[in-house]
Image (cartoon, rainbow, N blue to C red):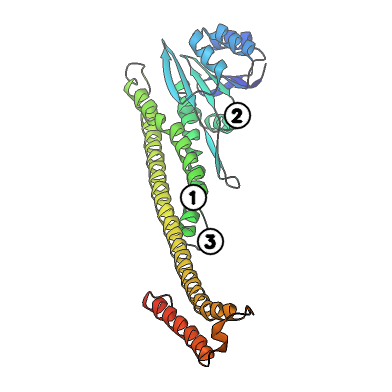
Amino acid sequence: MTIIDNAIYVDGIRTENPRSLSETFERMRERQGMSWIGLYRPSEEEIRAVADEFGIHALVVEDALGGHQRSKLERYGDVLFMVLRPARYLDEAEEVEFGEVHVVVGPDFVVTIRHAESPDLGRVRRRLEGDPTLLARGPEAVLYAILDEVVDEYAPVLAGLENDIDEIESQLFEDGVDATQRIYELGREVIDFQRATQPLSGMLEALLRGSEKYLVDEELQRYLRDVLDHTLRVADRANTFRTVLDNALTVESTIVARRQNEEMRRMTELSIRQNEEVKKISGWAAILFAPTLVGTIYGMNFDHMPELHWVLGYPMAIAMMLAMGLGLYAVFKRKGWL
C-alpha cells in the first residue's frame, strides 16, 4: 500500500497512526475522530480497498483510477470528490508543469490521492497539525488547507510567466530577433494554465453555496472566501497575460511584415538599378555594333567590291558608321536607356 501518511485526529490532535486501512476504520469509529489517509500514485487494488472501507462511490473510484482529469467538484451523497491541478513553472524550459491531486472528503474522513510531486501535502498536514483549532473543524478544514496550498503555489507560476513576458516585450523591437515562436509557445502555456485554474472559482462558489446545507463552519466559510478571492486574482492575471501575449504576437507579426516589406523594397530598388545598368550596357553594345557591322562587310576581301575603288568609298563607310551610331544613340537616349 502506497500510503504516505495515515492518521486519526480527535479534536484536532493526532492520536493514532494506524498501520492498515481496516485498523484505521476501527480506530476512527472507536475514538469518534477523523481519519486522513494520504496516498501517492496508488494501484487499482489499493484505491478499491480504500473505497470499500469508506463506502466511496464507484464513479469516484473510476475517476481516481483514470487520472488526467480536469479540475472539478462532484458530490455523491455525503461524500465530496474534488480534482485539483497544482502547477509549477520550469523557467529554463519556459513550461508550466501540472500535477494532479484527488481529494475525497467524507463526514469523518479525508483521502488524498496524489499523482505528481506537487502539491506538498506533507506541508499541509504539518500546518494543520500545528493549528489544532483549525483541524478540529473537521474534514472541510483539510479541504480548505489543500485548496489554499494549491492556489498559493500558483503565485510562483504567475511570477515566472510575467518575467518571461517582460523579456518578450523587450525583444519585440530588437533588430535581428524573431520572437514569434517564443510568444506562441508561451501563449500555449498560459492557455493550459487557464484551463487548470479557471474551474476553481466555480468550484469554490459551489462549496460556499452548499455550506448551510452541509453545515460547514462559518469560520471555514470565511477561509474559503479568502481562497476564492485569491483564485479570482489568479484567473484575472492569467487573462491579462493571454491578452498581452496576443497583442505581442500581433505587434511581432506587424514588425516582421514591415521588415519583409523593407527587404522587398531594397530588393526592388536593387533590381531596378540592375535593369538600368543592363539597359546602358545593351545600348552601348548596339551603338558599337553598327560600325562593327560596316567594318566587317568591307573587310571581307571580295574581288569585286566597287566601293573599294571609289574615291569617296572610305569617307562614305566612316559616315555610315557615324550615322548609324548617332542614330542609335538618339533612339536609346529618347527611350531613357542612356
Front residue of 148/107: it is 148
Location of the N terminus by quadrant is top right
Q: Quadrant of residue 68?
A: top right
Q: Residue 180 has which mark? A: 1
Number of marks in the image? 3
* Residue that badge 3 annotates: 176
Q: Position of residue 141 (x, y in %)?
A: 46, 25
Q: Secondary structure at mark 1?
A: helix
**What's the residue at 42%, 46% (across, down)?**
241
Q: Position of residue 294 (x, y in %)?
A: 54, 80
Crowdedness near tag 1: few (<14), some (14–19) or many (≥20) residues, C-alpha within 10 Å:
some
Sort mark 3 into few (<14), some (14-19) or many (20+) by Cα contacts within 10 Å: few
Q: Residue at x 59, y 78 (%)?
A: 296
Work out which residue is located at the far bottom of the displayed protein and give it: 311
Relative side of 287 to 92, left or right: left
- Which of the numbered marks, if any, corresponds to residue 116? 2
Q: Is residue 33 something one can see in this rendering?
A: no
Give the SS element for disc 3: loop
Task: Give the image location of residue 192, x and y in percent.
Answer: 48, 35
Q: Residue at x 52, y 88 (%)?
A: 313
| 136 up-or-down from 117: above or below | above
- Asked if disc 1 and disc 3 are in contact, CB closer than 8 Å, the reply is no
Q: Is residue 6 above or below residue 158?
A: above
Q: Nearer the viewer, residue 44 or 276?
A: 276
